[in-house]
Image: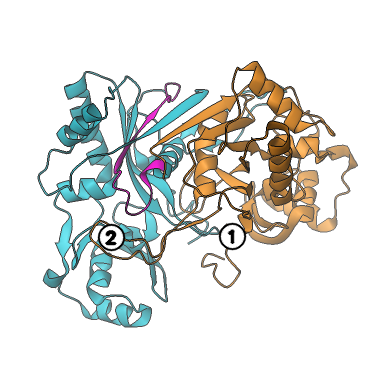
Chain colours: A cyan, B orange
Amino acid sequence: MSRRLEVIGIEGLPEIREGDDLVALFLDAVAEMGITIEDNDAIVITSKIISKSEGRVISLSDVHVSEEAAKIAADTGKDPRIVQLILEEARELVRVGKNLIIVETRHGFVCANAGIDESNVEAEKAVLLPEDPQASAVRLRRAIEERTGRSVAVLVSDTFGRAFRNGVTGICIGVSGIPALLDRRGEIDRFGKVARITMEAVADEVCAAANLVMGEFSEGIPVAIVRGTEVLKRCESDIRDVLFSREEDLFR
Amino acid sequence: MSRRLEVIGIEGLPEIREGDDLVALFLDAVAEMGITIEDNDAIVITSKIISKSEGRVISLSDVHVSEEAAKIAADTGKDPRIVQLILEEARELVRVGKNLIIVETRHGFVCANAGIDESNVEAEKAVLLPEDPQASAVRLRRAIEERTGRSVAVLVSDTFGRAFRNGVTGICIGVSGIPALLDRRGEIDRFGKVARITMEAVADEVCAAANLVMGEFSEGIPVAIVRGTEVLKRCESDIRDVLFSREEDLFR
């Protein structure tokens, strides 16, 4: 891999609304910072602004709360309308506890609250994950490549908690242009031994690196360029490569 | 946080042996590359070279295999001597399956094989995790600060698999100088809402970023400098801050 990596937070994007041309706004902000997009840049975009541009913002007053949602809200102490949205976005409830609902989303991601977030949006509104973040990554990559003439990767990032370790980290929920998993099986180590099982979740590592400049909450840095990923071979890729099948999953 | 981050892989360290002065070898390699250590550099060191310098390399021919280890080896298809070492390093078995043993280590980390690794070491040898990687981080940070006169952070990194997602990522098993968890509760978002629950596992994110230049297997880049973490306030810190108590842990 590359010996040097640079992570550049992109500032100055406006508040995103449904129908906004994200790519144009991103390229304007990049130009304003005096930066030029280069071949092999990996562009990490937080899911929240993609969701906003795709109209995935829900007014809580429009939510009809089912009986099941009301019951889980009472058990968990959560807003029943948020619980209703979580249930609509969920394929399976994984863990339910005090102020906590962990689900598998329709996309197959295991995360708290189905990725639904009330921060950095108006009061009484909530932002859902993009309908299909993998498709969003492909679409945004094509649009950036068309307008810049550069060959880039696009990663859609979010922040998820983890099992066994406290705290959230940046992770990838859609990737186009670099692999989700780097398969290093068969490589030879310095002592001539052959690697047997190592798959490196490079898309998640790129999003974790980006999250250090994007910050988790109020910074207003919704995009970062990760430069120096040349050795991650360009490829068609899919974030679903990191998802275990139900049979492989040891922790459910 | 910082708007720009740079990750610099440090090449040219020799193969590390017990008793080697890691800090001297690191500073030599840095000087050879024409780099100067700066205030606020976060220095990520892979656990393997710390283990080697601390003599945590075991000859498999010296391992006495217990009955329990022999049984688990038969069940999992693993080398009985490796299983014996795993049991000695484990506080608790978390999951046991075909070619798979996930444990909680003596330190409290949940990971495969108690972090024991046979790659990048001579045949018939295995490398254990450092005895106390948190203490190693503190010791190495002090030594680097004394010799350079700079105020730095040191992170001991490893690569662990995750629940729910395939592939390993760089994570932190010892940290001194930046927080393990960045507590962002109480911060105000762009719409005036107060953050409620967000703790960001910044030490793990720094190690994930470093892992992209270190690579997982044969690269021979055992150290990386992450530059641009100034806004992660200097502090005494402890990686045990990211570990859930047994009661908080939802997935065991």
Residue sitting at 76 percent across and 53 percent down? Answer: B89
Toward which corner of the image does residue A225 lie, by quadrant?
Answer: top left
- Callout 2: SS: loop
Residue A249's place in the image compared with B23, above or below, is below
The part of the image, by quadrant, that contains residue A217 is: bottom left
Whole-angstrom CA distance, mark 1 to mark 2, is: 25 Å
Marks counted in the figure total: 2
Horizontal arrangement in the rendering, residue B17 relative to residue B35 (left or right) = right
Q: Residue at x 69, y 51 (%)?
A: B134
Label of residue B241 in the image:
1
Quadrant housing the C terminus of chain B: bottom right
User: Residue A35 location, x and y as percent?
Assistant: 29, 25
**Could you say where residue B74 lies in the image, as x and y percent from the top left?**
74, 50
Q: Label 2: how many residues lie within 10 Å, few (<14), some (14-19) or many (20+)? A: many
Q: Position of residue B1 (x, y in %)?
A: 41, 45
In the rendered view, does A249 fall on the left or right side of A192?
A: left
What residue lies at 70% left-to-right and 53% top-to-bottom? B75
Which structural element holds mark 1? helix
Q: Which residues are magenta?
A: A213-232
Main SS of residues in magenta: loop
Residue A84 is marked as none
* Lateral position of residue A240 relative to residue B28, left or right: left
Residue at the location (36% across, 81% down)?
Answer: A75
Q: Which mark is residue A119?
A: 2
Query: What is the chain identity of the residue bearing mark 2?
Result: A
Look at the image and say whether residue A223 sits in the magenta stretch.
Answer: yes
Q: Residue B184 in magenta?
A: no
The amino acid type, in three-letter code, at marker 2 is Ser
Callout 1, which amino acid?
Answer: Asp
